[in-house]
Image (cartoon, helix red, strand yellow):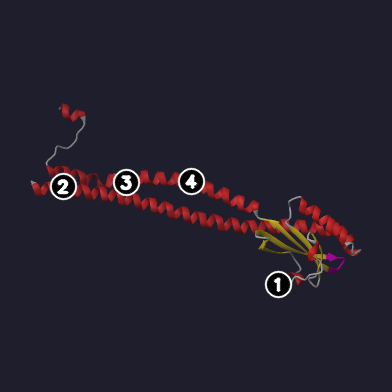
Amino acid sequence: MENNGQSAVQMQTEAREIRQKLAAAFGLLIILLMLLSIYIITWVEWDAGLERAKGEGQVLGKVIAVGMAEQLARNNFQGIEFALREYAGMGLLRYCVITSKTGKIIAGTDSGLNGKYLNDKWSFESLTATDLMMRRALYRGEQIYEAAVPIIIGEERFGSIRLGFPLQREFENIRKLLILNFCLGLAFLLIALFVAFSVSHAVTGRIEELAVEARGEPRKEGPNAQAG
């Protein structure tokens, strides 16, 4: 009987361990799915944000180019700088500069840059691009979208408009999606743990019954059976 009792205790211990392992497995599975979904959401939103920025950069660049075409033709750079500062003051832009077709800055929100050349590889490529170019960059320690929009006056290329505008809205969208994903993940984690314990109880229930029988304890029965 002593051996049977020890065997029964061991079976009950194993049943509890099975429950714990199943619960841990379900929990880890949900956590892995949460991490995967966070990666996918961030990656998709990051790409979608760049596409949205391209559209915004195209519109802003064309608005500025059309509004300043006459002043550019007259070389009225002071008027251009005033207008650019007005755009930047609205919070739409971090900076805006006008470059010649050789890459020389001729006007912008920072007049101290006038006369300097943009000499990085991306800037050189933008000088000959026939369509908008877009990238993510750093400006004074802040991540921004940088757009280069060609300026065409008549049929001749005059230069480019370089725009830098903030990423706050993109970060805000990602933050909201991650919070939503985290809340859903917690809910699914609780459900998974409940399912895990339910499944493990069903799986190990028979083991515990055998353990009770091995120890010689009476099986629990309903009140009707006891009355009989």
Residue 69 drawn in magenta: no
Tell me where the magenta segment starts and ends, as one range. 152-157
- Name the amino acid, label 1: Asp
Question: Alpha-carbon distance for marks 1 and 4?
Answer: 45 Å
**Sequence-earlier tag: 2 or 1:** 2
Question: Alpha-carbon distance for marks 2 and 3?
Answer: 21 Å
**Sequence-earlier tag: 3 or 1:** 1
CB-based contact (under 8 Å), mark 1 and mark 4: no
Tell me the element at label 1: loop
Percent position (x, y) of residue 202? 28, 44
Q: Nearer the viewer, residue 224 or 88?
A: 88
CB-based contact (under 8 Å), mark 2 and mark 1: no
Residue wearing tag 1: 120
Tell me the element at label 3: helix
Image point (10%, 49%), residue name: 3
- Name the amino acid, label 4: Leu
Image point (60%, 50%), residue name: 173
Residue wearing tag 4: 184
Q: Which mark is residue 8?
A: 2
Residue 40 sits above or below residue 123 on the image = above
Dot 2 alpha-carbon crowd within 10 angstroms: few under 14, some 14 to 19, many 20 or more: many
- Name the amino acid, label 2: Ala
Q: Which mark is residue 226?
A: none
